[in-house]
Image: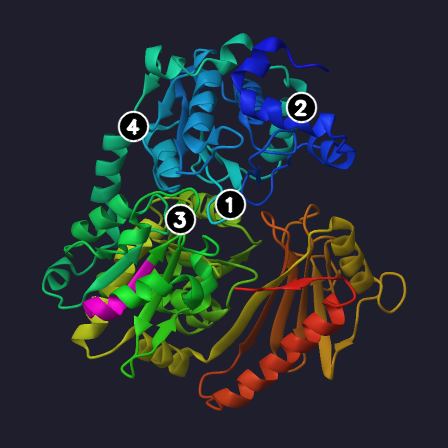
Protein backbone atom coordinates (compact mmCIF):
# COMPACT_ATOMS: atom_id res chain seq x y z
CA UNK A 1 0.00 0.00 0.00
CA UNK A 2 1.45 3.37 -1.04
CA UNK A 3 1.41 6.01 1.67
CA UNK A 4 -0.62 9.05 0.71
CA UNK A 5 1.31 12.26 -0.05
CA UNK A 6 0.02 13.66 3.26
CA UNK A 7 1.89 10.93 5.18
CA UNK A 8 5.04 11.53 3.15
CA UNK A 9 5.10 15.21 4.00
CA UNK A 10 4.42 14.46 7.64
CA UNK A 11 7.89 13.01 8.18
CA UNK A 12 10.25 13.49 5.22
CA UNK A 13 13.17 11.81 7.05
CA UNK A 14 11.53 8.37 7.43
CA UNK A 15 10.23 8.62 3.86
CA UNK A 16 13.79 9.27 2.68
CA UNK A 17 15.06 6.22 4.60
CA UNK A 18 12.52 3.98 2.85
CA UNK A 19 13.22 5.47 -0.58
CA UNK A 20 16.95 4.84 -0.28
CA UNK A 21 16.42 1.22 0.93
CA UNK A 22 14.20 0.56 -2.11
CA UNK A 23 16.60 2.31 -4.49
CA UNK A 24 19.59 0.30 -3.24
CA UNK A 25 17.65 -2.98 -3.27
CA UNK A 26 17.98 -3.84 0.45
CA UNK A 27 15.25 -6.48 0.35
CA UNK A 28 16.16 -8.27 3.61
CA UNK A 29 16.21 -5.00 5.55
CA UNK A 30 12.91 -3.88 3.95
CA UNK A 31 11.35 -7.20 4.91
CA UNK A 32 12.61 -6.85 8.51
CA UNK A 33 11.12 -3.39 8.83
CA UNK A 34 7.86 -3.82 6.93
CA UNK A 35 6.75 -7.44 7.35
CA UNK A 36 6.35 -7.51 11.12
CA UNK A 37 4.96 -5.18 13.75
CA UNK A 38 6.32 -4.44 17.23
CA UNK A 39 4.69 -6.45 20.00
CA UNK A 40 4.22 -5.62 23.67
CA UNK A 41 7.18 -6.91 25.68
CA UNK A 42 7.70 -6.60 29.45
CA UNK A 43 7.71 -2.81 29.07
CA UNK A 44 5.26 -1.94 26.29
CA UNK A 45 6.60 -1.37 22.78
CA UNK A 46 10.34 -0.83 22.39
CA UNK A 47 12.42 -0.72 19.20
CA UNK A 48 14.87 1.38 17.22
CA UNK A 49 13.77 4.79 15.94
CA UNK A 50 13.56 4.28 12.19
CA UNK A 51 11.16 3.89 9.26
CA UNK A 52 9.02 0.75 9.09
CA UNK A 53 6.27 -1.01 11.06
CA UNK A 54 8.82 -2.93 13.18
CA UNK A 55 10.32 0.39 14.40
CA UNK A 56 9.33 3.37 16.53
CA UNK A 57 8.41 6.35 14.37
CA UNK A 58 5.62 8.91 13.87
CA UNK A 59 3.42 6.49 11.97
CA UNK A 60 3.72 3.50 14.32
CA UNK A 61 3.12 5.73 17.37
CA UNK A 62 -0.01 7.15 15.69
CA UNK A 63 -1.18 3.62 14.82
CA UNK A 64 -0.51 2.44 18.39
CA UNK A 65 -2.49 5.33 19.86
CA UNK A 66 -5.38 4.80 17.44
CA UNK A 67 -5.46 1.17 18.62
CA UNK A 68 -5.37 2.39 22.24
CA UNK A 69 -8.29 4.74 21.53
CA UNK A 70 -10.37 1.96 19.95
CA UNK A 71 -9.71 -0.37 22.89
CA UNK A 72 -10.33 2.27 25.57
CA UNK A 73 -13.50 3.52 23.84
CA UNK A 74 -14.84 -0.05 24.01
CA UNK A 75 -13.91 -0.83 27.63
CA UNK A 76 -13.91 2.53 29.44
CA UNK A 77 -17.39 4.04 29.10
CA UNK A 78 -16.35 7.36 30.67
CA UNK A 79 -13.17 7.73 28.58
CA UNK A 80 -14.18 11.25 27.50
CA UNK A 81 -14.35 12.47 31.07
CA UNK A 82 -11.33 10.52 32.39
CA UNK A 83 -8.83 11.24 29.62
CA UNK A 84 -5.28 10.02 29.00
CA UNK A 85 -1.95 10.98 30.63
CA UNK A 86 1.06 11.40 28.29
CA UNK A 87 4.69 11.91 29.34
CA UNK A 88 8.05 11.72 27.57
CA UNK A 89 11.80 11.49 28.17
CA UNK A 90 14.67 13.27 26.37
CA UNK A 91 15.44 10.87 23.52
CA UNK A 92 15.92 12.27 20.02
CA UNK A 93 17.35 11.18 16.69
CA UNK A 94 18.11 13.49 13.79
CA UNK A 95 18.15 10.83 11.05
CA UNK A 96 14.52 9.77 11.64
CA UNK A 97 13.21 13.12 12.89
CA UNK A 98 12.00 11.28 16.02
CA UNK A 99 12.08 12.90 19.42
CA UNK A 100 10.22 11.62 22.46
CA UNK A 101 8.52 15.02 22.71
CA UNK A 102 7.24 14.91 19.13
CA UNK A 103 5.99 11.32 19.57
CA UNK A 104 4.21 12.39 22.78
CA UNK A 105 2.55 15.30 20.97
CA UNK A 106 1.36 12.97 18.20
CA UNK A 107 0.02 10.56 20.86
CA UNK A 108 -1.90 13.48 22.37
CA UNK A 109 -3.17 14.62 18.94
CA UNK A 110 -4.75 11.21 18.18
CA UNK A 111 -6.77 11.39 21.41
CA UNK A 112 -7.59 15.11 21.13
CA UNK A 113 -8.95 14.69 17.61
CA UNK A 114 -11.41 12.16 19.10
CA UNK A 115 -12.40 14.63 21.87
CA UNK A 116 -10.58 12.73 24.61
CA UNK A 117 -8.97 15.02 27.23
CA UNK A 118 -5.19 14.68 27.47
CA UNK A 119 -2.88 15.46 30.40
CA UNK A 120 0.29 16.09 28.39
CA UNK A 121 3.35 17.13 30.42
CA UNK A 122 4.92 20.29 29.00
CA UNK A 123 8.47 19.02 29.55
CA UNK A 124 10.30 15.74 30.13
CA UNK A 125 9.46 13.87 33.35
CA UNK A 126 10.56 10.70 35.17
CA UNK A 127 8.60 7.65 34.04
CA UNK A 128 6.97 7.18 37.51
CA UNK A 129 5.20 10.55 37.09
CA UNK A 130 2.92 9.03 34.42
CA UNK A 131 1.46 6.21 36.58
CA UNK A 132 1.34 8.67 39.49
CA UNK A 133 -0.71 11.11 37.38
CA UNK A 134 -2.99 8.31 36.10
CA UNK A 135 -3.94 7.52 39.71
CA UNK A 136 -4.12 11.17 40.80
CA UNK A 137 -6.53 12.20 38.02
CA UNK A 138 -8.39 8.89 37.70
CA UNK A 139 -7.37 8.80 34.03
CA UNK A 140 -8.39 5.94 31.75
CA UNK A 141 -4.75 5.12 30.93
CA UNK A 142 -1.27 6.60 30.55
CA UNK A 143 1.47 6.53 27.92
CA UNK A 144 5.15 7.26 28.53
CA UNK A 145 7.42 7.73 25.51
CA UNK A 146 10.74 6.30 26.69
CA UNK A 147 13.30 3.58 26.03
CA UNK A 148 14.60 3.87 29.60
CA UNK A 149 18.22 2.59 29.69
CA UNK A 150 18.28 1.08 26.17
CA UNK A 151 20.89 2.16 23.60
CA UNK A 152 20.54 5.66 22.12
CA UNK A 153 19.01 4.39 18.83
CA UNK A 154 15.91 3.05 20.61
CA UNK A 155 12.66 4.50 21.85
CA UNK A 156 9.50 3.05 23.33
CA UNK A 157 5.80 3.39 24.10
CA UNK A 158 4.98 2.31 27.65
CA UNK A 159 1.30 1.88 28.52
CA UNK A 160 -0.33 2.12 31.97
CA UNK A 161 -3.86 0.94 32.76
CA UNK A 162 -6.27 2.98 34.89
CA UNK A 163 -5.17 1.15 38.05
CA UNK A 164 -1.76 2.89 37.63
CA UNK A 165 0.14 -0.32 36.78
CA UNK A 166 1.64 -1.25 33.40
CA UNK A 167 -0.78 -3.12 31.16
CA UNK A 168 -0.73 -6.89 31.33
CA UNK A 169 -2.60 -9.64 29.54
CA UNK A 170 -5.21 -9.65 28.03
CA UNK A 171 -5.09 -5.85 27.50
CA UNK A 172 -1.77 -5.97 25.59
CA UNK A 173 -3.02 -8.56 23.06
CA UNK A 174 -6.34 -6.77 22.62
CA UNK A 175 -4.67 -3.39 22.05
CA UNK A 176 -2.38 -4.98 19.43
CA UNK A 177 -5.45 -6.36 17.65
CA UNK A 178 -7.04 -2.90 17.69
CA UNK A 179 -3.79 -1.38 16.33
CA UNK A 180 -3.87 -3.76 13.37
CA UNK A 181 -7.53 -2.91 12.73
CA UNK A 182 -6.89 0.85 12.61
CA UNK A 183 -3.59 1.22 10.79
CA UNK A 184 -4.66 3.98 8.37
CA UNK A 185 -4.02 7.31 10.16
CA UNK A 186 -7.12 9.43 10.77
CA UNK A 187 -7.02 12.93 9.26
CA UNK A 188 -6.57 14.63 12.66
CA UNK A 189 -3.90 12.20 13.93
CA UNK A 190 -0.99 14.11 12.36
CA UNK A 191 -2.17 17.45 13.72
CA UNK A 192 0.24 18.02 16.61
CA UNK A 193 -0.87 21.69 16.72
CA UNK A 194 -3.95 20.41 18.57
CA UNK A 195 -1.72 20.29 21.64
CA UNK A 196 -1.64 24.10 21.61
CA UNK A 197 -5.13 24.83 20.31
CA UNK A 198 -7.38 22.24 21.99
CA UNK A 199 -9.19 23.16 25.20
CA UNK A 200 -9.09 19.48 26.15
CA UNK A 201 -5.29 19.56 26.64
CA UNK A 202 -4.03 20.19 30.15
CA UNK A 203 -0.45 20.46 31.45
CA UNK A 204 -0.24 18.49 34.73
CA UNK A 205 3.45 19.29 35.39
CA UNK A 206 3.27 21.66 38.39
CA UNK A 207 0.30 19.96 39.96
CA UNK A 208 1.84 16.46 39.75
CA UNK A 209 5.30 17.60 40.82
CA UNK A 210 3.96 19.40 43.90
CA UNK A 211 1.66 16.55 44.88
CA UNK A 212 4.35 13.87 44.31
CA UNK A 213 6.93 15.75 46.38
CA UNK A 214 4.44 16.25 49.24
CA UNK A 215 3.52 12.57 49.19
CA UNK A 216 7.20 11.64 49.59
CA UNK A 217 6.61 12.51 53.28
CA UNK A 218 4.91 9.10 53.62
CA UNK A 219 8.29 7.36 53.15
CA UNK A 220 10.43 9.96 54.96
CA UNK A 221 10.89 8.88 58.60
CA UNK A 222 13.74 11.00 60.04
CA UNK A 223 13.52 14.46 58.48
CA UNK A 224 15.08 16.28 61.46
CA UNK A 225 18.00 13.89 61.54
CA UNK A 226 18.47 14.39 57.77
CA UNK A 227 18.77 18.17 58.18
CA UNK A 228 21.74 17.66 60.51
CA UNK A 229 23.54 14.93 58.55
CA UNK A 230 27.17 15.68 57.60
CA UNK A 231 27.03 13.17 54.71
CA UNK A 232 27.51 14.46 51.15
CA UNK A 233 25.95 12.84 48.10
CA UNK A 234 26.70 12.93 44.37
CA UNK A 235 23.95 12.33 41.81
CA UNK A 236 24.25 11.44 38.13
CA UNK A 237 21.17 11.67 35.95
CA UNK A 238 22.91 9.80 33.09
CA UNK A 239 22.10 12.49 30.52
CA UNK A 240 18.38 11.92 31.17
CA UNK A 241 15.44 13.43 33.02
CA UNK A 242 16.43 12.94 36.68
CA UNK A 243 18.38 16.05 37.72
CA UNK A 244 15.64 18.52 38.74
CA UNK A 245 13.44 15.89 40.32
CA UNK A 246 16.12 14.20 42.46
CA UNK A 247 17.26 17.65 43.65
CA UNK A 248 13.72 18.41 44.79
CA UNK A 249 13.22 14.98 46.41
CA UNK A 250 16.39 15.42 48.51
CA UNK A 251 15.20 18.86 49.65
CA UNK A 252 11.79 17.40 50.53
CA UNK A 253 13.62 14.93 52.81
CA UNK A 254 15.47 17.79 54.53
CA UNK A 255 18.81 17.28 52.74
CA UNK A 256 20.70 19.90 50.75
CA UNK A 257 20.45 18.97 47.05
CA UNK A 258 23.01 16.33 45.98
CA UNK A 259 26.09 17.43 44.00
CA UNK A 260 25.28 16.84 40.32
CA UNK A 261 27.76 15.33 37.86
CA UNK A 262 28.02 18.39 35.58
CA UNK A 263 28.78 16.47 32.36
CA UNK A 264 25.70 14.23 32.87
CA UNK A 265 23.28 16.68 34.46
CA UNK A 266 21.54 17.91 31.29
CA UNK A 267 19.70 15.85 28.70
CA UNK A 268 21.88 14.49 25.88
CA UNK A 269 20.24 11.97 23.51
CA UNK A 270 23.72 10.84 22.38
CA UNK A 271 24.70 9.86 25.96
CA UNK A 272 28.13 11.21 25.07
CA UNK A 273 30.04 10.36 28.28
CA UNK A 274 28.96 6.72 28.75
CA UNK A 275 29.47 3.60 26.66
CA UNK A 276 25.86 2.61 27.37
CA UNK A 277 23.19 4.58 29.28
CA UNK A 278 22.58 1.85 31.85
CA UNK A 279 23.81 2.50 35.42
CA UNK A 280 23.25 -1.20 36.17
CA UNK A 281 26.53 -1.88 34.36
CA UNK A 282 28.33 -0.66 37.50
CA UNK A 283 31.70 0.93 38.09
CA UNK A 284 32.73 1.28 34.43
CA UNK A 285 29.80 3.58 33.58
CA UNK A 286 29.85 5.38 36.97
CA UNK A 287 33.42 6.62 36.46
CA UNK A 288 32.59 10.37 36.34
CA UNK A 289 30.35 10.11 39.42
CA UNK A 290 32.96 8.28 41.50
CA UNK A 291 35.80 10.67 40.57
CA UNK A 292 33.62 13.71 41.40
CA UNK A 293 32.64 12.15 44.73
CA UNK A 294 36.31 11.61 45.60
CA UNK A 295 37.11 15.26 44.84
CA UNK A 296 34.11 16.50 46.82
CA UNK A 297 34.65 14.03 49.70
CA UNK A 298 31.17 12.64 49.18
CA UNK A 299 30.79 9.07 50.48
CA UNK A 300 27.75 8.06 48.46
CA UNK A 301 26.85 8.19 44.77
CA UNK A 302 23.31 7.74 43.47
CA UNK A 303 22.70 7.41 39.71
CA UNK A 304 19.29 7.39 38.05
CA UNK A 305 18.91 5.84 34.61
CA UNK A 306 17.81 8.12 31.71
CA UNK A 307 14.08 7.99 32.56
CA UNK A 308 14.76 7.95 36.34
CA UNK A 309 12.80 4.82 37.21
CA UNK A 310 15.89 2.80 38.25
CA UNK A 311 18.67 3.59 40.70
CA UNK A 312 22.32 2.55 41.11
CA UNK A 313 24.16 3.25 44.39
CA UNK A 314 27.86 3.22 45.28
CA UNK A 315 29.54 3.82 48.65
CA UNK A 316 33.14 4.69 49.41
CA UNK A 317 34.90 2.18 51.64
CA UNK A 318 37.34 3.31 54.32
CA UNK A 319 40.23 1.97 52.26
CA UNK A 320 39.25 4.42 49.47
CA UNK A 321 37.79 1.80 47.11
CA UNK A 322 34.15 1.88 46.01
CA UNK A 323 31.43 -0.66 46.67
CA UNK A 324 28.83 -0.59 43.87
CA UNK A 325 25.79 -2.37 45.26
CA UNK A 326 23.97 -4.91 43.11
CA UNK A 327 20.19 -4.63 42.82
CA UNK A 328 19.85 -7.60 45.16
CA UNK A 329 22.16 -6.06 47.79
CA UNK A 330 20.35 -2.73 47.67
CA UNK A 331 17.06 -4.56 48.06
CA UNK A 332 18.35 -6.28 51.21
CA UNK A 333 19.17 -2.85 52.67
CA UNK A 334 15.95 -1.15 51.54
CA UNK A 335 13.78 -4.08 52.63
CA UNK A 336 15.42 -4.01 56.08
CA UNK A 337 14.99 -0.21 56.26
CA UNK A 338 11.30 -0.17 55.31
CA UNK A 339 10.54 -2.97 57.79
CA UNK A 340 12.57 -1.28 60.55
CA UNK A 341 10.55 1.93 60.17
CA UNK A 342 7.24 0.08 59.85
CA UNK A 343 7.90 -1.72 63.15
CA UNK A 344 8.83 1.58 64.86
CA UNK A 345 5.43 3.01 63.86
CA UNK A 346 3.46 -0.22 64.52
CA UNK A 347 4.71 -1.76 67.78
CA UNK A 348 1.85 -4.31 67.90
CA UNK A 349 3.22 -7.50 66.23
CA UNK A 350 -0.33 -8.36 65.06
CA UNK A 351 -0.12 -5.44 62.61
CA UNK A 352 2.68 -7.22 60.74
CA UNK A 353 0.07 -9.72 59.49
CA UNK A 354 -1.12 -7.27 56.84
CA UNK A 355 2.41 -6.34 55.64
CA UNK A 356 3.69 -7.60 52.28
CA UNK A 357 6.92 -7.37 50.31
CA UNK A 358 7.16 -8.40 46.66
CA UNK A 359 9.98 -9.38 44.30
CA UNK A 360 10.23 -10.86 40.83
CA UNK A 361 11.13 -14.52 40.66
CA UNK A 362 14.62 -13.91 39.20
CA UNK A 363 15.49 -11.59 42.10
CA UNK A 364 17.16 -12.46 45.40
CA UNK A 365 15.18 -14.50 47.94
CA UNK A 366 16.46 -12.28 50.78
CA UNK A 367 12.97 -10.83 51.42
CA UNK A 368 11.68 -14.39 51.81
CA UNK A 369 14.25 -14.90 54.57
CA UNK A 370 13.09 -11.63 56.23
CA UNK A 371 9.46 -12.74 56.05
CA UNK A 372 10.19 -16.17 57.55
CA UNK A 373 11.80 -14.62 60.63
CA UNK A 374 9.75 -11.40 60.98
CA UNK A 375 6.28 -12.80 60.28
CA UNK A 376 5.12 -10.68 57.34
CA UNK A 377 4.15 -11.96 53.86
CA UNK A 378 6.44 -12.30 50.87
CA UNK A 379 5.29 -13.02 47.32
CA UNK A 380 7.06 -13.59 44.00
CA UNK A 381 5.86 -12.45 40.60
CA UNK A 382 6.98 -13.03 37.02
CA UNK A 383 9.87 -10.78 35.86
CA UNK A 384 8.85 -7.22 34.97
CA UNK A 385 7.46 -4.52 37.26
CA UNK A 386 4.05 -4.71 35.57
CA UNK A 387 3.42 -7.93 37.54
CA UNK A 388 4.44 -6.26 40.80
CA UNK A 389 2.32 -3.16 40.09
CA UNK A 390 -0.80 -5.20 39.36
CA UNK A 391 -0.26 -7.38 42.45
CA UNK A 392 0.13 -4.28 44.69
CA UNK A 393 -3.17 -3.02 43.29
CA UNK A 394 -4.92 -6.32 44.16
CA UNK A 395 -3.42 -6.55 47.66
CA UNK A 396 -4.20 -2.91 48.51
CA UNK A 397 -7.87 -3.46 47.59
CA UNK A 398 -8.09 -6.13 50.33
CA UNK A 399 -6.57 -3.91 53.05
CA UNK A 400 -3.00 -5.26 52.82
CA UNK A 401 0.00 -2.91 52.87
CA UNK A 402 2.90 -3.49 50.47
CA UNK A 403 5.85 -1.65 52.03
CA UNK A 404 8.64 -2.65 49.60
CA UNK A 405 8.99 -4.24 46.15
CA UNK A 406 11.92 -4.79 43.82
CA UNK A 407 13.44 -6.45 40.78
CA UNK A 408 17.15 -7.26 40.71
CA UNK A 409 17.83 -4.99 37.72
CA UNK A 410 18.00 -2.00 40.15
CA UNK A 411 14.24 -1.39 40.11
CA UNK A 412 12.83 -0.45 43.53
CA UNK A 413 9.60 0.83 45.05
CA UNK A 414 9.52 1.96 48.68
CA UNK A 415 5.92 2.12 49.87
CA UNK A 416 3.19 2.18 47.21
CA UNK A 417 2.99 5.80 46.08
CA UNK A 418 3.20 4.66 42.45
CA UNK A 419 2.68 1.16 41.06
CA UNK A 420 5.98 1.09 39.20
CA UNK A 421 9.66 1.23 40.04
CA UNK A 422 10.82 4.71 41.02
CA UNK A 423 14.44 5.93 41.05
CA UNK A 424 13.56 9.44 42.29
CA UNK A 425 11.89 8.44 45.56
CA UNK A 426 14.38 5.59 46.11
CA UNK A 427 17.34 8.00 45.80
CA UNK A 428 15.97 10.08 48.70
CA UNK A 429 15.19 6.95 50.77
CA UNK A 430 18.77 5.66 50.26
CA UNK A 431 20.14 9.02 51.43
CA UNK A 432 18.00 8.92 54.58
CA UNK A 433 18.99 5.32 55.34
CA UNK A 434 22.69 6.21 54.91
CA UNK A 435 22.29 9.27 57.15
CA UNK A 436 20.60 7.19 59.87
CA UNK A 437 23.25 4.45 59.71
CA UNK A 438 25.95 7.13 59.90
CA UNK A 439 24.59 8.18 63.32
CA UNK A 440 25.20 4.56 64.45
CA UNK A 441 28.76 4.63 63.00
CA UNK A 442 27.74 2.16 60.30
CA UNK A 443 28.25 2.27 56.56
CA UNK A 444 25.61 0.73 54.29
CA UNK A 445 28.02 -2.09 53.47
CA UNK A 446 28.55 -2.85 57.17
CA UNK A 447 24.79 -2.92 57.65
CA UNK A 448 24.43 -5.27 54.67
CA UNK A 449 26.80 -7.70 56.41
CA UNK A 450 24.74 -7.34 59.63
CA UNK A 451 21.60 -8.23 57.66
CA UNK A 452 23.26 -11.32 56.18
CA UNK A 453 24.48 -12.38 59.63
CA UNK A 454 20.90 -12.29 60.93
CA UNK A 455 18.95 -13.60 57.94
CA UNK A 456 21.56 -15.72 56.14
CA UNK A 457 23.99 -14.82 53.39
CA UNK A 458 22.37 -14.45 49.98
CA UNK A 459 25.06 -14.41 47.32
CA UNK A 460 23.95 -13.90 43.75
CA UNK A 461 25.40 -13.50 40.27
CA UNK A 462 23.54 -11.86 37.41
CA UNK A 463 24.78 -11.29 33.88
CA UNK A 464 23.86 -11.90 30.26
CA UNK A 465 25.01 -12.89 26.80
CA UNK A 466 23.90 -11.09 23.63
CA UNK A 467 22.18 -13.03 20.86
CA UNK A 468 20.93 -11.13 17.81
CA UNK A 469 19.44 -14.21 16.15
CA UNK A 470 15.96 -15.23 17.46
CA UNK A 471 16.10 -18.76 15.90
CA UNK A 472 19.31 -19.44 17.88
CA UNK A 473 17.55 -18.44 21.12
CA UNK A 474 14.67 -20.76 20.26
CA UNK A 475 17.14 -23.60 19.53
CA UNK A 476 18.98 -23.12 22.86
CA UNK A 477 15.78 -23.38 24.93
CA UNK A 478 14.35 -26.20 22.81
CA UNK A 479 17.55 -28.21 23.44
CA UNK A 480 17.12 -27.68 27.21
CA UNK A 481 13.54 -28.96 27.10
CA UNK A 482 14.53 -32.08 25.18
CA UNK A 483 18.04 -32.81 26.46
CA UNK A 484 17.29 -36.35 27.63
CA UNK A 485 14.76 -37.20 24.91
CA UNK A 486 11.45 -35.55 23.98
CA UNK A 487 10.19 -33.38 26.85
CA UNK A 488 12.97 -34.55 29.20
CA UNK A 489 14.93 -31.78 30.95
CA UNK A 490 18.57 -32.14 32.09
CA UNK A 491 19.20 -33.88 35.43
CA UNK A 492 22.56 -32.25 36.05
CA UNK A 493 24.80 -29.37 35.01
CA UNK A 494 28.56 -29.91 35.26
CA UNK A 495 29.09 -31.92 38.44
CA UNK A 496 25.93 -30.56 40.03
CA UNK A 497 22.66 -32.43 40.44
CA UNK A 498 19.39 -30.65 39.53
CA UNK A 499 16.46 -31.48 41.85
CA UNK A 500 13.64 -29.29 40.41
CA UNK A 501 12.90 -27.53 37.13
CA UNK A 502 10.27 -24.85 36.50
CA UNK A 503 9.52 -23.66 32.96
CA UNK A 504 7.06 -20.74 32.88
CA UNK A 505 7.11 -20.71 29.06
CA UNK A 506 5.45 -24.14 28.93
CA UNK A 507 3.83 -24.15 32.39
CA UNK A 508 5.83 -27.12 33.73
CA UNK A 509 7.07 -27.38 37.34
CA UNK A 510 8.55 -30.67 38.54
CA UNK A 511 8.27 -29.62 42.21
CA UNK A 512 4.45 -29.45 42.10
CA UNK A 513 2.36 -32.61 42.63
CA UNK A 514 0.49 -32.01 39.34
CA UNK A 515 3.69 -30.79 37.58
CA UNK A 516 1.91 -27.49 36.78
CA UNK A 517 3.53 -24.10 37.30
CA UNK A 518 1.96 -21.84 39.97
CA UNK A 519 3.14 -18.63 38.27
CA UNK A 520 1.14 -17.58 35.18
CA UNK A 521 2.36 -18.83 31.80
CA UNK A 522 4.63 -16.50 29.84
CA UNK A 523 4.52 -17.98 26.32
CA UNK A 524 6.06 -14.95 24.57
CA UNK A 525 9.35 -15.15 26.45
CA UNK A 526 11.68 -17.96 27.46
CA UNK A 527 12.28 -18.65 31.15
CA UNK A 528 13.52 -21.82 32.86
CA UNK A 529 14.55 -22.10 36.54
CA UNK A 530 16.76 -24.90 37.94
CA UNK A 531 17.01 -25.75 41.66
CA UNK A 532 20.22 -27.62 42.50
CA UNK A 533 20.77 -30.16 45.26
CA UNK A 534 23.26 -27.82 46.97
CA UNK A 535 20.56 -25.11 47.35
CA UNK A 536 21.58 -22.90 44.44
CA UNK A 537 18.72 -21.55 42.31
CA UNK A 538 19.50 -20.58 38.69
CA UNK A 539 17.32 -19.03 35.98
CA UNK A 540 17.87 -18.53 32.25
CA UNK A 541 15.52 -16.09 30.52
CA UNK A 542 15.24 -13.86 27.48
CA UNK A 543 14.97 -10.09 27.95
CA UNK A 544 11.67 -8.48 26.98
CA UNK A 545 13.38 -5.33 25.71
CA UNK A 546 16.86 -6.24 24.42
CA UNK A 547 18.53 -9.09 22.42
CA UNK A 548 19.87 -10.74 25.59
CA UNK A 549 19.74 -14.09 27.32
CA UNK A 550 20.04 -13.25 31.02
CA UNK A 551 21.22 -15.64 33.68
CA UNK A 552 20.66 -15.40 37.43
CA UNK A 553 22.14 -17.63 40.12
CA UNK A 554 21.83 -17.37 43.90
CA UNK A 555 23.09 -19.28 46.92
CA UNK A 556 20.72 -18.80 49.88
CA UNK A 557 22.63 -19.84 52.99
CA UNK A 558 21.02 -20.51 56.37
CA UNK A 559 21.56 -17.93 59.17
CA UNK A 560 24.86 -18.67 60.90
CA UNK A 561 26.64 -20.12 57.85
CA UNK A 562 29.77 -17.98 57.60
CA UNK A 563 32.17 -19.64 55.17
CA UNK A 564 31.48 -17.06 52.49
CA UNK A 565 34.45 -17.86 50.25
CA UNK A 566 33.37 -21.50 49.79
CA UNK A 567 29.77 -20.40 49.04
CA UNK A 568 31.08 -17.93 46.46
CA UNK A 569 33.35 -20.53 44.86
CA UNK A 570 30.50 -23.06 44.58
CA UNK A 571 28.24 -20.39 43.03
CA UNK A 572 30.96 -19.40 40.56
CA UNK A 573 31.37 -23.01 39.43
CA UNK A 574 27.63 -23.61 38.97
CA UNK A 575 27.24 -20.31 37.05
CA UNK A 576 30.16 -21.15 34.73
CA UNK A 577 28.76 -24.64 34.06
CA UNK A 578 25.28 -23.21 33.42
CA UNK A 579 26.59 -20.80 30.78
CA UNK A 580 28.98 -23.25 29.10
CA UNK A 581 26.74 -26.32 29.01
CA UNK A 582 23.27 -24.85 28.58
CA UNK A 583 24.00 -21.76 26.44
CA UNK A 584 27.10 -23.03 24.53
CA UNK A 585 28.39 -19.49 23.76
CA UNK A 586 31.06 -20.49 21.22
CA UNK A 587 28.86 -22.83 19.22
CA UNK A 588 25.96 -20.35 19.19
CA UNK A 589 28.07 -17.21 18.52
CA UNK A 590 26.89 -15.51 21.70
CA UNK A 591 28.62 -12.30 22.74
CA UNK A 592 29.64 -12.03 26.38
CA UNK A 593 28.76 -8.89 28.34
CA UNK A 594 31.45 -6.40 27.35
CA UNK A 595 31.07 -3.46 29.75
Residue 347 visible to the viewer: no
User: Dot 3 surroundings within 10 Å: few (below 14), some, or many (20 or more)?
Assistant: many
- Residues at marks 1 and 4, CA–CA distance in whole angstroms: 24 Å
- Marks counted in the figure total 4
Q: Which residues lie in the magenta part?
A: 293-302
Report x, y in % for residue 20: 67, 27
Q: Does residue 291 lie above or below 27 as drawn?
A: below
Residue at 46%, 39% in the rendered image: 146
Q: Earlier in the sequence, mark 3 or mark 1?
A: 3
User: Dot 2 surroundings within 10 Å: few (below 14), some, or many (20 or more)?
Assistant: few
Q: Is residue 595 left or right of residue 447?
A: right
Q: Are marks 3 and 1 in contact (CB under 8 Å)?
A: no
Q: Which of marks 4 and 3 is nearer the N terminus?
A: 4
Q: Which of marks 1 and 4 is nearer the N terminus?
A: 4
Q: Nearer the viewer, mark 3 or mark 1?
A: 3
Q: Which of marks 2 and 3 is nearer the N terminus?
A: 2
Q: What element carries label 2?
A: helix
Q: Residue 309 carries which label?
A: 3
Amino acid sequence: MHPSPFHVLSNPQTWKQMESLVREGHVVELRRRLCSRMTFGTAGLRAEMSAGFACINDLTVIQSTQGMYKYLAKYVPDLKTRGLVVGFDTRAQTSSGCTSERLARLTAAVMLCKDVPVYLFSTYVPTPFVPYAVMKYGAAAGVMITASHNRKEDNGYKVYWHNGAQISSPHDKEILRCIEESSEPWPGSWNEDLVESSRLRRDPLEDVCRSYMEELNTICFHRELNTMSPLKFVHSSFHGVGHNYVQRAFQQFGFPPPIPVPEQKDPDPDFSTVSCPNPEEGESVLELSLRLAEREEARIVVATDPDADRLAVAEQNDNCGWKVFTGNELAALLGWWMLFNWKEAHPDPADTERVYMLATTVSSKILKAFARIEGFHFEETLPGFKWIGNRIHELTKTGKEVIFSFEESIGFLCGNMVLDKDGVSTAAVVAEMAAYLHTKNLSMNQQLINIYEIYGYHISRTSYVICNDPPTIHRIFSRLRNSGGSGVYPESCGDYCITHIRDVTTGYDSSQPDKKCVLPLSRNSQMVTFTFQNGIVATLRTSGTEPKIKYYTEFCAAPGERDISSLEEELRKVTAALVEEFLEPEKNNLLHRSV
